[in-house]
Image (cartoon, grey):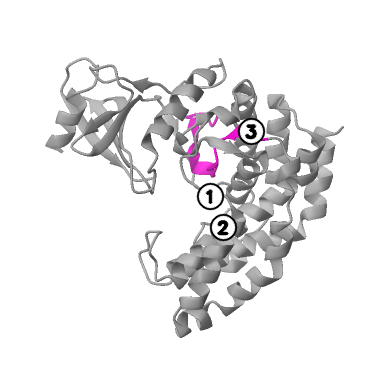
Amino acid sequence: MENLKEILSYFEIPNGAYEFEIISNGLINDTFLVREGTISTYILQKINTSVFKNVNGLVNNLSSVLPLLRHAAYAEIRLIKTKKGEPVLDHQKEIWRLMNYIPECQVFNTTRDVHIAFETGKILGLFHKLLTIGQPKDLEITIEDFHNLAYRYEQFLEAYEQAKADHLKNAHREIDFVKRNIAELLSIEFDKLPLRICHNDTKLNNVLFSENRKALCLIDLDTIMPGYFLYDFGDAIRTLANPAAEDERDLSLISFDPLMFSAFLKGIQQSGLEFTLSEMDSMHLGAVLMPFLHGLRALTDYLENNKYYKVSYETQNLDRCRSLFRFAELALDHSDFMKKEIKKYFQG
């Protein structure tokens, strides 16, 4: 990791005998924990410019948003500038950034702990509340059509037309699920919803917790851009209300936990974040849309022979799709419950 020491030398930090440890949670950027002796000091990342093609937009978004995310109950993330005063390092056609390390922290991939669900709702609500003073229109799009279901459906149809016969046969139930549900989800009236500054990737392991399970802040902020609250709501629910892994092969282990859902809502309520009537009326659809959308992308990738997502075996994307679609199906079954709970917490 000698090259990492060279990279670090370009940033405005004290000289030290730094060591590096790979952090493997993220699937996009290359991330390293920087230590000096036994003390963790920084987070170093190489930005994946194949995914984030608009690096300037990404940097500008973070420069606009991070100053707004300052609150006694929200751990501050700071970009450490280079010695030339730049927020990122452009070195040999690679883009690097350095951030402060938040001590004594942890993340969870899944949980059955209602306290974690409550804390996740509370920190997500605070995140959105702090960003209400920002202007979504001032932010740039870092990934085009990221949550655009119509676009993802077009990609699926193209993959379907060109897929191998055995792939179509293996995925015929999932393809039928898409055909049965796509029209309803495409009919969501986004034009009636207020545009917000959203995180857009609020799965549980993008929330940082203290050692005593208090939510500290959201991490992996590269997808911050204009969006709708139901995106962040739905992505959180799909990893909170379901204790199973995203690629769980035993579909009987996938569930929708009403207690976790209600605890999450209670956390949002405590943050003091306010919603429009249109947001409250459509919020439950986020819990269906987001697992459906992610499942559709995994299915498309399977039909395209695994071009986008990393897989450790050939049918892993199909397993991801089946798991996500099963949760979307369970969320549909719980629609009335979700609407009732949302009304209870946010409409009195």
Residue at figure coordinates x 67%, y 43% from the top left: 230
Asked if residue 265 is positioned above or below residue 80 in the image, the reply reads: below
Give the alpha-carbon distance from disc 3 to disc 1, as whole Å.
16 Å
**What amino acid type is highlighted by mark number 2?**
Tyr
Where in the figure is residue 329, as x and y percent of width and height? 69, 63
Identify the mark at residue 196; answer none if there is no mark: 3
Q: Amino acid at mark 3?
A: Arg
Residue type at mark 1 is Asp
The residue depicted at 53 percent of the width and 17 percent of the height is 70
Circles 1 and 2: CB atoms closer than 8 Å: yes
- x, y percentage for residue 186? 69, 58
Residue at image point 21% right, 27% down: 8
- Asked if residue 174 is among those painted magenta in the image, a careful observer would answer no
* Residue picked out by circle 2: 151
Residue ID for mark 1: 145
Q: Nearer the viewer, residue 20 or 314?
A: 314
Task: Give the image quarter of residue 136.
Answer: top right
Q: Which residues are magenta?
A: 195-215
Label 3 sits on a secondary structure element that is strand
Q: Is residue 126 above or below residue 108?
A: above
In the figure, residue 187 lies in which quadrant?
A: bottom right
